[in-house]
Image (spheres, rainbow, N blue to C red):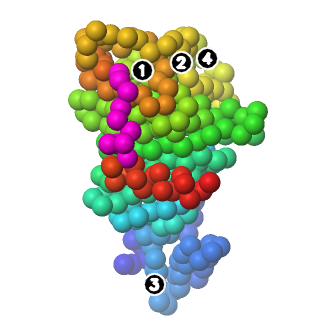
């Protein structure tokens, strides 16, 4: 690769590029060496990925602490790259796992989310303050496990959206499975607020309109959670007979399946049978080891 090509590729990341220059980042992340005589580039791919993240400017969402198998991520300005242990991820990052692959993501300020195989998660918003931490992510496909208990006096809100549903938690454990036609949410500890994805998107749009120029730089302040009072689970005469029109609360041991047409089925799931699921086993083992 010629020096001219390198300059063209890296022009987005730096205002200028000079020969006889050595860039070295801490912890051995990469070393880019360009000399007038040799014109050699080492580990260019890592250089591009790191600088893309460095200058992205988004809030840090957390880090991929435990990538198992083939786990990849991409930012808004860089293509798919293999994740390494303790890989930092930011707002706008998309993470995906291949077959027989999993990963754990430690959230900034505490809490963990884990992805099963053949999953894809987009990290949308992170609003991290000393005593208030809000996270918003979009599970495009696959399985996710969320474990995030708030410290004393702390508010920790995490919303996971799937193609058909959204689950908003406030310090608890739940699992979600995303499908194009139907998504499921299962609660293992605490309570989870659930609604249609369509209703949630509309609510967020209305909130942003109302907030106007509330945030810095004209960006509306990020808020999370239902705007209407959360009510007890709705009892219906049969599965998929009623459309979910408002937020409902699921307690531990409950499951809800929501179809793309908004109709839902809520019931108590078989926890002994669920414990045989390999993804559930893995998560329960990690949870037990942390106690």
For the residues marked 1 and 4, what is the alpha-carbon distance in whole angstroms?
22 Å
> Camera-side residue: 244 or 252?
252
Residue 276 visible within the image: yes
For the residues marked 4 and 2, what is the alpha-carbon distance in whole angstroms?
15 Å
Extreme-bottom residue of the structure: 37
Which numbered marker is on residue 226?
2
Contact (CB < 8 A) between labels 2 and 3? no
For the residues marked 2 and 3, what is the alpha-carbon distance in whole angstroms?
55 Å
Q: Which residue is mark 1?
A: 195
Q: Is 70 a magenta residue? A: no
Question: SS at mark 1?
Answer: strand
Which numbered marker is on residue 211?
4
Q: Is 274 a magenta residue? A: yes
> Camera-side residue: 247 or 136?
247
Contact (CB < 8 A) between labels 1 and 3? no
Q: Which residue is mark 3?
A: 40
State the residue at coordinates (50%, 47%).
Answer: 113
Residue 55 visible within the image: no
Which of discs 1 and 3 lies nearer the camera? The answer is 1
Contact (CB < 8 A) between labels 4 and 3? no
On the image, the x and y values in percent for residue 189 come to 53, 36
Q: Quadrant of residue 217?
A: top right
Question: SS at mark 2?
Answer: loop
State the residue at coordinates (32%, 42%).
Answer: 273
On the image, the x and y values in percent for residue 203 come to 48, 16
Question: SS at mark 4?
Answer: helix
Chain part drawn in magenta: 266-275
> Camera-side residue: 289 or 12?
289
On the image, the x and y values in percent for residue 86 come to 55, 63
Going from N to C along the chain, the mark reached first, 1 or 3, is: 3
State the residue at coordinates (49%, 90%).
Answer: 37
Q: Residues within 10 Å of mark 2 (few under 14, many from 20)?
A: some
């Amino acid at each position: 690769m010629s020096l001219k090509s390198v300059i063209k590729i890296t022009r987005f990341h730096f205002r200028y590029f000079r020969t006889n220059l050595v860039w070295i980042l801490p912890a051995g992340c990469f070393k880019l060496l360009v000399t007038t005589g040799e014109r050699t580039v080492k580990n260019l791919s890592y250089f591009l990925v790191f600088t893309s993240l460095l200058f992205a400017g988004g809030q840090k969402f957390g880090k991929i602490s435990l990538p198992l198998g083939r786990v990849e991520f991409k930012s808004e300005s860089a293509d798919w790259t293999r994740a390494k242990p303790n890989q930092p991820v930011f707002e706008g990052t998309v993470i995906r796992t291949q077959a027989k692959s999993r990963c754990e993501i430690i959230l900034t300020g505490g809490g963990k989310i884990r992805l099963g195989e053949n999953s894809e998660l987009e990290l949308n918003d992170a609003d991290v303050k000393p005593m208030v931490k809000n996270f918003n992510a979009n599970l495009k496909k696959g399985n996710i496990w969320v474990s995030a208990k708030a410290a004393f006096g702390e508010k920790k809100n995490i919303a996971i959206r799937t193609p058909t549903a959204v689950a908003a938690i406030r310090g608890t454990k739940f699992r979600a499975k995303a499908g194009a036609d139907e998504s499921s949410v299962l609660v293992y500890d605490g309570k989870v607020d659930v609604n249609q994805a369509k209703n949630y998107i509309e609510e967020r749009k209305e909130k942003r309109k109302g907030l106007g120029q509330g945030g810095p730089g004209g960006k509306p302040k990020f808020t999370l959670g239902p705007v209407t009072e959360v009510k007890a689970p709705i009892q219906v005469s049969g599965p998929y007979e009623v459309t979910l029109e408002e937020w409902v609360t699921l307690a531990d041991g409950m499951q809800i399946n929501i179809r793309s047409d908004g109709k839902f089925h809520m019931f108590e799931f078989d926890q002994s049978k669920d414990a045989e699921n390999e993804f559930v086993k893995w998560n329960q083992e990690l949870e037990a080891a942390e106690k």
